[in-house]
Amino acid sequence: MEMSQIRYVLSAAKHLNFTKAAAECNVSQPALTKGVKSLETELGAEVFHREGRKILVSDFGKSMLPHLQHIVDEAAATQALAQNFRLLEKVPLRLGVLSTIGHVRLARFFAQFEKNHSGLELSVNEASASDLKKKLSDGDIDVALMTLTEELEEEFRARPLYVERYVVVFPPEHRLGTFNSVSLQDLSQENYVDRLACELREMVMSVCESKGVELYARFRSEREDWVQAMVAAGIGFAFMPEYSVTLPGLLQRPLVEPEVSRTIAAFTVPGRKHSPALDALMRSSQTFAWPG
């Protein structure tokens, strides 16, 4: 039983005419007629009754047509899966990641994802939220991992991944090392390393001002590695998302009164069709054991 023969029979049953069926299948009528006859011989009964140029589906044919259609449908589904797998391997997946997001836990997710989709090519573009928004809208990246905000939810499709608290980070010899948690009042007049790239920076500064908390910024930087290095050097403390602290030796305590946290989400463009690779990534992101 050949797939072409099955398609000939299904087309003939649709048109009840071998000539029209041959035209639809892009073969000569004799070739189609021969293919139909060969399948009937293999099945051991006639699928069609011939009445001159007119053909009718036999009772046996009527019972067989759903099964033959199922074979064709399954073959098409198998071909689609195979094509998607090929595309998954050949098409690079372009990710944008907010520069303030810690890379260690994302790396663990990417490692598991790559293990389950061997051969997939990943490229990561680290940038600010404004740059990632533009790249995502322009189609320069496929998905952006950013902090969930109302503004972004209105513009893009968001899938939350995990929540992380903000912590106070300081060197081992700092007086805060004896604290179990740290409030803003505990930090008043402390030397401070200012994370200029922090998306919640203005909110924290506004709360400090409203509570009369005075912070003296001895160092400012948009780079996370510089901020942590200067904290480790004893320049001052810093506010950081708990999963972004990567420099060994730094101590951290939860920030309380007020507690501050952020939700990291994967953003895509509404209405834009996902590639097989992106679809696989989004599914994996929902089943991964994220921290917290």
Image (tube, helix red, strand yellow):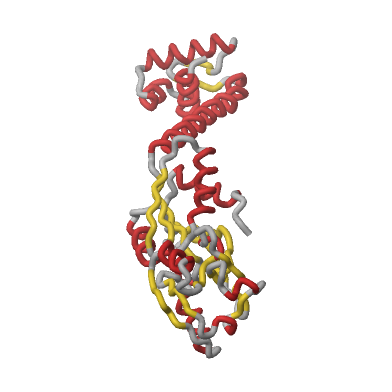
The one of 229 and 28 positioned closer to us in this rendering: 229
The residue depicted at 55 percent of the width and 17 percent of the height is 47
Residue placed at 52% from the left, 58% from the top? 248
Q: How many labels does the image show?
A: 0
Image position of 163 (left or right of 196): right
- Residue 6 as seen in the image, left or right of residue 163: left
Residue 243, above or below 256 = above
Name the foreground residue: 290 vs 22.
290
Decide: is 139 above or below 251. Answer: above
Q: Which residue is drawn at 41% across and 37% down?
A: 87
Nearest to the observer: residue 261 or residue 192: 192
Establish if 131 lies above or below 255.
above
Pinpoint residue 42: horizontal percent, then vertical percent. Answer: 55, 10
Say whether residue 129 is left or right of residue 109.
Answer: left
240 up-or-down from 268: above or below: below
As drawn, the residue found furthest toward the right would be: 180
Residue 255 image offset from top left, x and y in percent: 59, 74
The x, y position of residue 125, in whole percent, is 38, 54
The image shows residue 128 at horizontal and vertical percentages of 38, 64
Residue plotted at (41% across, 78% down): 218
